[in-house]
Each structure stands twice: as C-alpha cells, then as structure tokens.
Image (tube, rainbow, N blue to C red):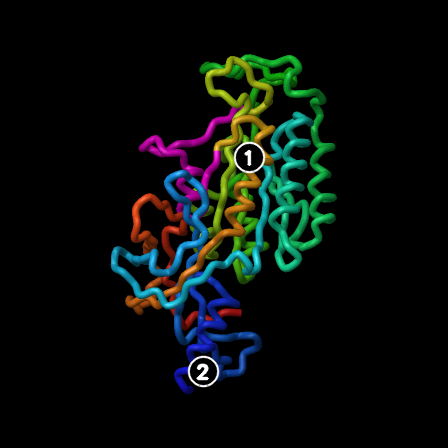
C-alpha cells in the first residue's frame, strides 16, 4: 500500500475511533468469522486538559508545547489535535441515598442544567442513580428533554420535606451511637452507597463499546459503602475503557467548622494510608478531577466547570516503542515544555495483545 494512503488511513482511524489502543490497518479475519477484525498496528491515544498557574483552562497550546513519556521513556508524538468537536459519551452518577427532598431537587436541577450545556446533538448522555442498588434512570441519548424528564423522577423520592434552614441538627460526633439528624433518624443508619458498583455498571453497560470521548461525573454525598466492587475494580475498568472520571464531593454545611448540618448523611470520604482522598486519586488517575462542593447550592456551578472542561480537551497519539503486548500496565506522563501548566491525563493503559480480536 503506498505510504500516502497508509498515512491517510492512520489519521482517519485516530480521528474516528479514538480508543485507548486504537487500531489501524484493520483486516477481516481470514477464517470469515462474523464481525471480527484484528489489529495490525497499535496507536495509543490520550485525551487531556491543561490548566495554567491561575487554574484557568489553557486550550490553545500547540503540539510543540508537549512531551509524552511511557514508563519514563519519551515517545514521538505522531498525532495531535484540539478535540472539542469529537463525539462525547457522558454519564452522571447521582448519589440518591438521602430522604431529604430538597437535596434530591438540587441534584435534579443541577443535572438537568449540566446535560443542557454538555450534550450536543452528536453526543450521548445517560443518568444512573446509586444508593442501596444501582438504577438506570436514562440510557444513552442525545434527547435533552428526555434526560430532563427522567432525572426529574428523583424529586419525588424524598420523604423528608423541608428547606435547608429548617430545624438544623448538630454535626455528628465520635461515639457508638450516631446522633439524630433533621429527619428524626440517626445519621447514616445502614446507609448504602454503591458508588464503585455504579462506576463499573455505567462503564461496562454504556461506555465499553462506544468510540470517541468517554466520561462519568459522580455526584457523591459520602464515600462508597457496601459495594460488591472495590476501588481497584472501579479504577481498572475506567482505565481499560479510557473513561475520564470526575468526582464532586458534597459537603453540607459548606464550612467544615460549622456546628450545624442540614443533611441526613455524614459527608465522610475515605483516605489512604498517606492521608490522600481515594476518590481524588481515582479521578486524577483517569485524567479527571475531584471537586469539593461546599453546599448543595454550589452543585450547578461545579457541573458547569466540568462541562467547560469537557469541551476544551486535547488529544495526542503515539506508537509505543515497546511492542511486546504483555497485558501489563504502562504508565503515561504528559509534560509541558514551560512550567506553570498542569496536565490532567490518564495515568496509563493496559498493553493488551495487539492480535486480540475486537468485535
């Protein structure tokens, strides 16, 4: 095949497929198996965003500003683009493990606004809720009205009616008996928040076989509780499918030193042995971020920030020099030539065998 045609095919594969290990030069299986194609060349592609020292999005940088390293060794960048126009597949995972109607109303309103801002006619959005189980509110669609209609259903799930300023309760204190919350019931009694399960379900059910950019936005009122999946399971499935995760950690009241809480959930988030928040590490490992939301009334603003970020992404691609596809995890690092920029990109990929069939 002439070199010019080969290059055209490679560019087309990168711009259309954009998978973690994209394949060019596809050929149908010689045995004639239905819908089976095999990789002949492997391209690693990465979506990422950049912020400057003022934490503002830097979306107009050129390829020469970046270097990419795999396991510490620099790799030649073969393709580079600003990809705000590539198809986006995005899901919102809502923590609905509360009986407070006003909280569910805030979640519904903020999610509706987010979908309006982020999902274009060529994109797909979906919504899941998680609590004692994981429920799909709406499967992937570009119909904004349908997404709004389905997320509005959670408004009726609250059994405690009131406004945030009614009957504030003291914040919880250490001890064997949880204090009584604003609903008259103890905080976090038998609370279940299947957050890790929601990540795996959303990724495997709605994102695994999609092409283009893929992301999940997790609205959490506390850390995971009682999932069958582990943190490692959730992170692995995100990295294997090149899904960017954003986590919004809700805190109400907005100030940690406040003596009052207006929610029936204790906003506690797990930390690792080094004191780092595990949901923050999960998000940043995929190229996303964790945002602290100090008050439910700030949720819409936080989601707007994520929407803006999703529409100002870069992508680059390279052919890894290491061609032994052993299935092991390889670290990726994207750095800028000038200091003062911070790059948000997934931390690596699994080097699955290049002859693995793709359906």
Label located before the other in sequence (2 or 1): 2
Judging depth in this view, the residue of 337 and 241 nearest the camera is 337
- Look at the numbered disc 1 and give the secondary structure of its residue: loop
Q: Count neighbours of disc 1 (C-alpha within 10 A) and say few if under 14, some if 14 to 19, many if 20 or more.
A: many
Quarter of image, res 300 = top right
Which residues are the magenta region? 266-291
Specify the farthest residue to the left. 73
- SS class, disc 2: helix
**x and y percent of residue 223 in the render?**
49, 33
In the displayed structure, 149 sits above or below 251; it is below
Horizontally, residue 147 falls left or right of residue 220, namely: right
Q: Quadrant of residue 57?
A: top left
Between the residue at mark 2 and the residue at mark 1, the CA separation in whole angstroms equals 52 Å
Q: Is the residue 78 above or below the residue 135 in the image?
A: below
**Badge number at residue 157:** none
Residue under label 1:
193
Towards the viewer: 306 or 173: 306
Find disc 2 in the rendering and name its residue.
Answer: 5
Circles 2 and 1: CB distance less than 8 Å? no
User: Measuring 38% from the left and 48% from the top, which residue is drawn there?
Assistant: 343
Q: In the image, residue 50 lies at what x, y percent? A: 41, 48
Q: Is residue 286 magenta?
A: yes
Q: Residues within 10 Å of mark 2 (few under 14, many from 20)?
A: few
Is the stretch drawn in magenta largely helix, strand or loop? loop
In the rendering, at what x and y percent does residue 325 appear?
Answer: 34, 66
């Amino acid at each position: 095949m002439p070199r010019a045609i080969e290059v055209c095919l490679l560019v087309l594969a990168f711009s259309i497929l954009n998978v973690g290990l994209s394949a060019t030069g596809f050929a149908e299986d010689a045995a004639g198996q239905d819908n089976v194609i095999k990789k002949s060349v492997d391209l690693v592609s990465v979506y990422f965003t950049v912020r400057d020292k003022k934490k503002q999005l830097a979306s107009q940088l050129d390829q020469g500003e970046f270097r990419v390293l795999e396991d510490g060794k620099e790799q030649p960048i073969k393709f580079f683009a600003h990809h705000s126009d590539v198809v986006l597949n995005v899901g919102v995972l809502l923590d609905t493990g509360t009986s407070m109607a006003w909280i569910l109303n805030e979640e519904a309103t903020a999610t509706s606004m987010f979908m309006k801002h982020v999902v274009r006619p060529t994109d797909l959005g979906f919504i899941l809720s998680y609590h004692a189980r994981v429920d799909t509110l709406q499967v992937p669609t570009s119909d904004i009205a349908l997404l709004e209609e389905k997320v509005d259903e959670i408004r009726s799930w609250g059994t405690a009616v009131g406004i945030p300023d009614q009957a504030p309760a003291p914040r919880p204190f250490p001890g064997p008996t949880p204090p009584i919350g604003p609903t008259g019931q103890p905080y976090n009694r038998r609370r279940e928040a299947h957050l890790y399960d929601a990540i795996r379900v959303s990724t495997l059910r709605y994102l695994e076989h999609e092409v283009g950019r893929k992301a999940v936005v997790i609205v959490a009122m506390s850390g995971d509780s009682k999932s069958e999946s582990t943190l490692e399971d959730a992170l692995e499935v995100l990295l294997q499918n090149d899904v960017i995760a954003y986590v919004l950690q809700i805190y109400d009241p907005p100030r940690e030193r406040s003596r009052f809480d207006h929610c029936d959930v204790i906003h506690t988030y797990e930390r690792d042995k080094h004191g780092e928040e595990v949901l923050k590490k999960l998000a940043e490992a995929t190229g996303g971020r964790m945002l602290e939301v100090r008050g439910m009334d700030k949720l819409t603003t936080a989601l707007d920030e994520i929407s803006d970020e999703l529409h100002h992404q870069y992508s680059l691609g390279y052919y890894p020099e290491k061609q032994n596809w052993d299935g092991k995890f390889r670290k990726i690092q994207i750095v800028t030539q000038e200091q003062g920029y911070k790059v948000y990109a997934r931390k690596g990929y699994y080097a699955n065998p290049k002859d693995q069939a793709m359906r």
